[in-house]
Structures are given as C-alpha cells and as structure tokens.
C-alpha cells in the first residue's frame, strides 16, 4: 500500500515512477522518465491549487496567532510555500513538459 502511494505512473507510457525518480522536482527541475525518456513536470493546475490553499492556510495561521497584519502574513506564507510546495509536487501526478 505504501509502495502504491509513493509511485506515480508516467502520463506518456503509463509505467511507474518511484519517489526517488521524482526527487529532482524538489529543485524545480524536470523529471525524465526512465522508460520513455520524456521530460515530465508537475501538473500546473494541481500545483497552483496546492500553492493557493497552502499559502492561505499558513497566512491565516500567522495572522491569527501573531500581531502581523494580513499582508505581512501573506508574504511570510509565500516564502514558506516556496520551500514547502515542491514536497507536494512529489505526491501528485505529472504531465509531459511541452516546449513551444
């Protein structure tokens, strides 16, 4: 069960990618599928949703528990999210990186 949680299928070839193979996402680098050699990135909409709810949750927690106003709390939350958000990218599906 934990193995299923840690692996995600490649959107191109549907073969599994392990958590260690998706580790370059922590550095905001694309992942290359070892089976089909396509470049993969996190799904943009899922990444945007994660950044939104995480930043709003952190800024709300900072605002209610400190004397900072909402703008300072949001600024602090965005800094925290820039560090934490790549961890969430490891857990969600990937999409093929398109070069225009």
Image: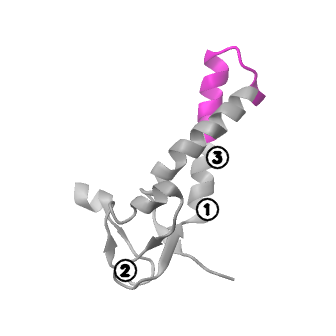
For the point 31% across and 57% down, the residue is 5
The circle drawn on residue 45 is 1
Q: Write down the residue under mark 3.
A: 52
- Residue shown at 61% from the left, 16% from the top: 65
Crowding at label 1, few (<14), some or many (≥20) Cα neighbours within 10 Å?
few
Quarter of the image holding residue 90?
bottom left
Q: Earlier in the sequence, mark 2 or mark 3?
A: 2
Left or right placement of residue 36 versus residue 77 in this view: left
Q: Are marks 1 and 2 in contact (CB under 8 Å)?
A: no
Residue 92 position, x and y percent, is: 45, 60
The residue drawn where x is 40% and y is 77% is 33
Q: Which residues are magenta?
A: 55-71
Q: Determine the image quadrant of residue 43.
A: bottom right
**Is residue 45 or residue 66 the one in the foreground?**
66
Vertical placement of residue 61 versus 4, above or below: above
Residue that badge 2 annotates? 14
């Amino acid at each position: 069960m934990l193995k299923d949680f840690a692996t995600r299928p490649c959107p191109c070839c549907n073969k599994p990618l392990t958590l260690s193979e998706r580790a370059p996402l922590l550095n905001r680098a694309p992942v290359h599928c070892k089976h089909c050699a396509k470049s993969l990135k996190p799904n943009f909409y899922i990444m945007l949703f994660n950044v939104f709810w995480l930043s709003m949750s952190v800024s709300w927690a900072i605002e209610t528990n400190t004397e900072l106003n909402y703008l300072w709390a949001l600024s602090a939350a965005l800094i925290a999210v820039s560090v934490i958000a790549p961890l969430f990218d490891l857990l969600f599906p990937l999409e093929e990186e398109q070069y225009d």
